[in-house]
């Protein structure tokens, strides 16, 4: 089976979040199941540096007024088709914004060109290649199903994966005239509150919709989580499903991870203590008999960091220490810095992101706290489970799906892998941490929770089977 994936970022070449982890890992995960994946990506500087001149597969002289060169390359085990348009993609800054942090004003054009080019590839632009299924990711590639629906050639079936429905690709109405779509497309899915909605168009046109966890697939049908698209999602509920993400268990392996001071496994947990000492030293935290809790997160409202800032004093009073790694909202960065100043030796903050340090924190902290207001899947808790860093999580999205709450029944049965925060408030965060501190004091019970988490299958194996089953259903329906 041949699958054409379309994405705006892919690990390890370009990454801003979990989207890249999925698009980078899924091709390798489905390959043993008989799926060949080629991924269409924009020709950003970081990608062009890896691809070089590449092999010219085709030239498309007019894609929304731009000359497009399609380059083929295999990088890091990925089979790539690079959409090279220097004027659109070869810029300083990130994939979506300049060095000043402001979104590029022509993002609508950049990702419409990516989508149109991918749709042409899917319908025969490359001699000898026609995919069986097209799999697109998030708003940046969401116009692909729309272009397929209005193209001249019979299209393959398509699936769109929503990694975060809060990001929708909304643009002014006047850009519609430059999208090379018939006038009927406006009322048939592209129009969104008087403007153009890329994600809405894809959700309307694709034959299947997936999200990155079953709970999130249910949540986006509600006004609280649907971000204005819940009506459309409910109207297409028969094609909506959730497949939880996995992680690369070779990259995230505590027994082999070179970023740890000491490697360990569920059978050799004692060695983990060396990483704990390294975390304390790195962050300047005092030795403690209470749990050391990690925060590895963007410091934003979505991640519940404002509530965590309110909860800091209560967390310290409960007996825990906090090591914070992240960046984001300036006011929140300041709030965490103030908490560290109030509690020297108990709270420490590193503003920014450091991948090796993130690994050390997972391998050395006792627990990891994730109080997100919404979390489509989340990967941080999966890393925590893998590394024996017990997750304390909000009961939402993929967090709820992947962490077994250590409630009374679960504790009695010895099956808990973490702690759920109930209704998300600063007080409930403190309550959850307080319970974690109580369990931490019972070494045998805490060790059992760690081992339960480390025994959890957080690989891509089950997820890959879910995607392949979906691809096959789409082929059967198309036939």
Image: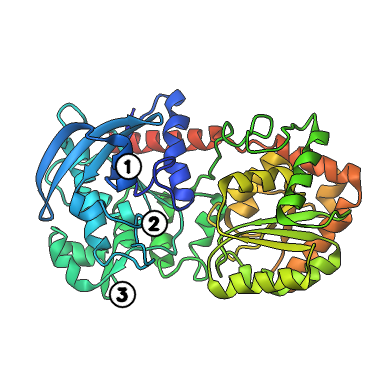
Compared to residue 435, the image places residue 131 above or below, namely: above
Of circles 3 and 1, which is in front? 1
Q: Which mark is residue 47?
A: 1
Tell which of 371 and 476 is nearer to you.
371
Position of residue 381 in the picture relative to residue 170 (left or right): right
Position of residue 123 in the picture relative to residue 77 (left or right): left
Residue 425 in sight from this viewpoint: no
Tell which of 46 and 137 is nearer to you.
46
Residue designated by label 3: 193
Of circles 1 and 2, which is in front? 1
Spatial CA distance of label 1 from label 2 is: 36 Å
Residue 138 x %, y %: 38, 54
Q: Secondary structure at mark 3?
A: loop
Q: Quadrant of the C terminus?
A: top left
Residue 295 in sight from this viewpoint: yes
Residue drawn at x 47%, y 43% as measured from the top left: 21
- Looking at marks 3 and 1 on the same chain, the residue that comes earlier in the sequence is marked by 1
Residue 190 x %, y %: 25, 64
Position of residue 12 in the picture relative to residue 459 (left or right): left
Q: Secondary structure at mark 2?
A: loop
User: Which scheme is used to colour this image of the protein?
Assistant: rainbow
């Amino acid at each position: 089976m041949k699958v054409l994936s379309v994405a705006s970022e892919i690990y390890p070449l370009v990454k801003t979040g979990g989207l890249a982890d999925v698009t980078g890992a899924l091709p390798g995960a489905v390959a043993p199941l008989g799926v060949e994946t080629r991924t269409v990506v924009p020709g950003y500087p970081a990608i062009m540096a890896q691809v070089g001149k590449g092999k010219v597969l085709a030239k498309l002289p007019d894609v929304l007024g731009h000359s497009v060169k399609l380059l083929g390359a295999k990088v890091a085990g990925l089979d790539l088709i690079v959409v090279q348009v220097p004027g659109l993609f070869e810029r300083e800054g990130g994939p979506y914004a300049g060095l000043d942090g402001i979104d590029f004003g022509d993002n609508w054009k950049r990702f419409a060109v990516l989508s149109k080019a991918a749709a042409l590839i899917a319908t025969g632009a490359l001699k000898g290649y026609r995919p069986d299924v097209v799999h697109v990711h998030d708003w940046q590639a969401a116009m692909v199903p729309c272009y397929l629906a209005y193209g001249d050639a019979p299209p393959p079936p398509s699936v769109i994966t929503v990694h975060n429905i809060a990001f929708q690709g909304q643009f002014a109405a006047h850009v519609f005239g430059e999208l090379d779509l018939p006038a009927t497309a406006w009322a048939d899915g592209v129009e969104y509150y008087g403007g153009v909605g890329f994600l809405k168009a894809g959700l309307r046109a694709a034959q299947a919709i997936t999200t990155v966890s079953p709970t999130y697939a249910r949540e986006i049908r509600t006004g609280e989580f649907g971000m204005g698209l819940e009506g459309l999602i409910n109207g297409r509920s028969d094609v909506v499903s959730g497949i939880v993400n996995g992680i690369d268990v070779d990259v995230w392996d505590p027994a082999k991870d070179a970023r740890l001071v000491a490697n360990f496994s569920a059978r050799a947990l004692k060695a983990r203590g060396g990483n704990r000492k390294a975390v304390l030293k790195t962050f300047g935290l005092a030795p403690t008999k209470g749990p050391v809790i990690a925060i590895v997160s963007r410091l934003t409202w979505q991640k519940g960091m404002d509530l965590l800032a309110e909860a800091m004093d209560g967390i310290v009073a409960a007996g825990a220490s906090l090591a914070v790694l992240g960046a984001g909202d300036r006011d929140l960065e300041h709030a965490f810095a103030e908490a560290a100043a109030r509690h020297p030796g108990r709270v420490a903050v590193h503003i920014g992101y450091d991948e090796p340090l993130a690994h050390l924190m997972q391998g050395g902290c006792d627990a990891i706290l994730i109080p997100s207001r919404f979390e489509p899947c989340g990967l941080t808790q999966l890393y925590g489970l893998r590394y024996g860093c017990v997750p304390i999580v909000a009961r939402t999205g993929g967090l709820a799906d992947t962490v077994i709450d250590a409630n009374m029944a679960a504790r009695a049965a010895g099956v808990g892998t973490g702690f759920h925060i109930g209704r998300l408030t600063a007080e409930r965060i403190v309550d959850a941490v307080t319970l974690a501190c109580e369990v931490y004091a019972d070494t045998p019970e805490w060790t059992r929770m760690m081992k339960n988490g480390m025994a959890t299958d957080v690989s891509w194996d089950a997820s890959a089977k879910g995607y392949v089953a979906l691809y096959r259903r789409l082929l059967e329906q198309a036939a």
